[in-house]
Image (cartoon, rainbow, N blue to C red):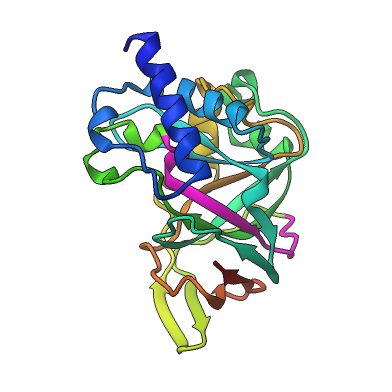
């Protein structure tokens, strides 16, 4: 798409980040391709003066593997309080993330799972907050949501160090809030496993924020459908016998 249009979208996203009452219109995003959407991510990140030590990867069927930054001011540790500041939040996802001890390069990805595992220091359970700066993100075309940091709105890192690749499919997921305890059903990784989306994206990376670097935390996809909860109060999510991950919301 024309560079001027890209610049306009970057400005619109920056304005929406600073003022949630000014969302980006979905109609302006419908023609985006994946390359343009990823370029917009990088420009918005820089325009906000933000960095990203957490990223998300996805490997949707029939399309390119994708990545998006989760900006550092939106990341907190389990047990902390996350201030939403009017930010749109649609719900939560419980996920497994890999903490990298070295860069995951295309060459490492081509060498397969053993080489990628050697680049990972450990794994954690995390909670991703899902939210958007688009007025109607489901109508924003195939890559509009990608330009919006893949509709992320924050991340909570679990405190438990998981040294080995966890098997997650079939594990129970439990949600605790002020309303009580809810069993959310068995976990199912959306992309076939924890390593698969990392390998798929690392094989052909095209981000503009330096994804898959040593020290980064890479989250790999929701293990259950979107969890809708109130945007104030405390929520705790537990995967199997791993330590729960919790956060307190304030607006």
Q: Is residue 150 magenta?
A: yes
Q: Is residue 173 above or below residue 125?
A: below
The foreground one among 83 and 126 is 83
Residue 104: percent from the left, percent from the top? Answer: 66, 28
Q: Quadrant of the C terminus?
A: bottom right
Residue 175: percent from the left, percent from the top? Answer: 49, 78
Q: Which residues are magenta?
A: 148-163
Residue 82: percent from the left, percent from the top? Answer: 63, 63
Left of 187 or right of it: where is 105? right
Q: Is residue 33 above or below residue 229?
A: above
Residue 35 in view (yes/no): no
The foreground one among 213 and 20 is 20
x 44%, y 68%: residue: 170
User: What is the quadrant of residue 109 in the picture?
Assistant: top right
Q: Quadrant of the N terminus?
A: top left
Left of 1 or right of it: where is 114? right
Q: Is residue 141 above or below residue 237?
A: above
x 47%, y 36%: residue: 15
User: What is the quadrant of residue 140 in the picture?
Assistant: top left
x 74%, y 64%: residue: 159
The foreground one among 9 and 94 is 9
Q: Is residue 221 magenta?
A: no
x 27%, y 32%: residue: 142
The foreground one among 49 and 112 is 49
Residue 169: percent from the left, percent from the top? Answer: 46, 62
Please give the count of numbered marks on the rendered protein.
0
Left of 131 or right of it: where is 214? right
């Amino acid at each position: 798409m024309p560079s001027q249009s890209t610049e306009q979208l970057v400005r619109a996203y920056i304005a929406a980040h600073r003022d949630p009452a000014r969302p980006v219109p979905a109609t302006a995003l419908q023609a985006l391709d994946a390359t343009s959407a990823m370029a917009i991510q990088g420009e918005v990140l820089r325009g906000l003066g933000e960095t990203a030590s957490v990223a998300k990867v996805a490997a949707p069927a029939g399309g390119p593997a994708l990545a998006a930054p989760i900006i550092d001011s939106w990341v907190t540790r389990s047990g902390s309080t996350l201030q939403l500041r009017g930010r749109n939040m649609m719900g939560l996802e419980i996920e497994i993330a890999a903490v990298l001890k070295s860069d995951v390069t295309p060459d490492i990805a081509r060498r397969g799972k053993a080489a990628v595992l050697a680049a990972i220091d450990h794994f954690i359970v995390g909670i991703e907050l899902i939210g958007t700066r688009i007025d109607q993100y489901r109508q924003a075309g195939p890559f509009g949501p990608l330009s919006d940091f893949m509709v992320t709105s924050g991340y909570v890192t679990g405190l438990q160090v998981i040294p080995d690749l966890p098997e997650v499919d079939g594990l129970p997921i439990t949600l605790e809030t002020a309303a009580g305890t809810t069993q959310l059903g068995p976990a199912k990784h959306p992309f076939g496993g924890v390593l698969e989306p990392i390998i798929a994206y690392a094989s052909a990376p095209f981000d503009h924020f330096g994804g898959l670097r040593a020290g980064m935390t890479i989250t790999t996809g929701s293990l259950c459908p979107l969890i809708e909860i109130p945007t104030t109060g405390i929520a705790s999510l537990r995967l199997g016998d791993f330590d729960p991950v919790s956060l307190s919301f304030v607006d």
